[in-house]
Structures are given as C-alpha cells and as structure tokens.
Image (cartoon, coloured by chain):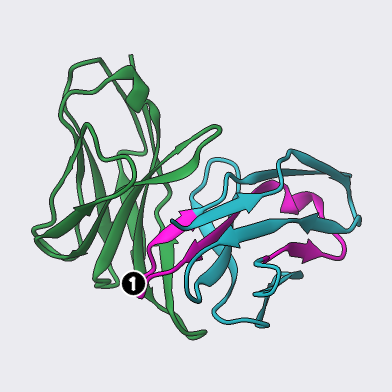
Chain colours: A cyan, B green
Amino acid sequence: GDSVTQMEGPVTLSEEAFLTINCTYTATGYPSLFWYVQYPGEGLQLLLKATKADDKGSNKGFEATYRKETTSFHLEKGSVQVSDSAVYFCALSGTSYGKLTFGQGTILTVHP
Amino acid sequence: DAGITQSPRYKITETGRQVTLMCHQTWSHSYMFWYRQDLGHGLRLIYYSAAADITDKGEVPDGYVVSRSKTENFPLTLESATRSQTSVYFCASSGQTSGGGETQYFGPGTRLLVL
C-alpha cells in the first residue's frame, strides 16, 4: 500500500537558518504530493502541493519539488522565522478523490 | 461562515458513554473524511464518505460509527467510548483547487478526553 516517510524530528533552528525536511514515499502510479502545516492548537492547513513529476510547489517561502526518480518531496525554506514553528506533514494522494496518506509529522521549533 | 467547522472543540467523557462529534462544511464537497491524530502515529483515517448515504471504512474504524444523511454534515459517533479513543479528531472535505486535482481541507479539530 501507499506510505510516506518523513525525517524524524524534532528540528530546532535559529531564525534565518536554512530548513530542509525530508519526505520520501511509496505508491503505485502517479500520486499527488502535499505538505500540510499545523500550528499549535489548530487544524492542518495546506502549505503546498505538486500533482506531477518535476512540479515545484511553493508558498510563503517554502518550496518542494516532486522527484519521481528518487520518490521524494523534500520541503525547503531559505530563511526560517519564529512564526514558522509548527508541525509539518508530508502526504500523498493516489486516488482521484483526495484520500490522503500522511507521514508521521516533523515538529519544527525556530528560536530568535 | 464558509468553510469546515467541528463541534464541540473540546469534550471530556467517561468510559462507556456514547459521544458524537459533529462536522459541517459549506462547500458542497462530495468527499468527507474523519481522522484521529495521536503522538507517534500521525493522522490515521477512521472513515470517509463519497456522498450522502455512502460511507466506507478507513485504517482504524473499530469502535466508531458514521452517517451522512446530508452532503454538508458528517457526524462521527463513539458508541461506547474507551480510554484508547482519547485523541484529537479532525474532519476534512475534499474539493478541486486551481492547481488541479483534489485537495483536502481540514476543520479545527475536536480534543476528546475519555476518563
């Protein structure tokens, strides 16, 4: 079945540091890939998505590129802020109606 | 308000009691989902629904019941709550976005504590 593996956290960075959160997946066919973010006490919000190989999703300074050859969708940001502290989930959808398979989540803490 | 809402936001109950968590969406999305979030497990799918009166099991359906008589509502019932059902529950609905493909949108969650 489909599965998503995220780098284990927590990740702690200083403000303005470079961020990478690794995500790899196993799926049949050509899934869509997503990054969701969860701020403390809130639900999940879509951060970015990519629907086919070599697509780059981007939002709020975050980027991720759909790499089919390495089955990866790593999340990057060039300069993190304290307000980026949250839990980040990588997910895939192999169905036409959006049913998601999630990774375990990575806790990011950014210090001033 | 437009979007997806859940109620209650917080609930404390006792073992053996029946509890119903409500979910309402205003987009008329066909697909709706229930997840539970637990430390070390990420989000796990409990049930989903393709349309009114069509539901199907997800990864962890035992101990839960769902119904969907109207497109906009998708309640989740714990028929006899157990301590292992202490969790945060998220409802989601799925719709098309400008980038193509279906995308899930999540409610704010219900924090359930079973004593």
Horizontal side, residue B34 vs residue A34: left or right: left
Q: Give, as a three-letter code, the residue at label 1.
A: Tyr
The residue at 91%/55% (across/down) is A17
Residue at (67, 45) in percent of width and height: A106
Nearer to us in this view, A70 or B83:
A70
User: Where is residue B50 shown, x and y percent of the image?
Assistant: 21, 66
Quarter of the image where the N terminus of chain B is located: bottom left
Would residue A20 be found to the left or right of residue A59 on screen? right
Give residue B56's position: percent from left, percent from top: 20, 54
Tell me the crowding category of disc 1: few under 14, some 14 to 19, or many 20 or more residues within 10 angstroms, Cα based. some
The local secondary structure at tag 1 comes to loop
A82 in magenta: yes
* Position of residue A6 measured from the top left corner of the image (x, y, whole percent): 66, 50
Residue in view at x 15 percent, y 29 percent: B79
Q: Is residue A1 left or right of residue A39?
A: left
Compared to residue B98, the image places residue B74 above or below, namely above
Q: Which residue is mark 1?
A: A97
Question: Dividing the picture into quarters, in which one does residue A94 lie?
Answer: bottom left
**Figure check: A33 above or below A52:** above
Q: Which residues are magenta?
A: A72-101
Write the residue at 59% across / 60% down: A25
Quarter occupied by the C terminus of chain B: top left
Q: Is residue B27 magenta?
A: no
Residue nearest the viewer, comparing A46 with A35: A35
- Residue A86 point in image, percent of width and height: 67, 47
From the viewer's side, name the closer residue of B20 and B44.
B44
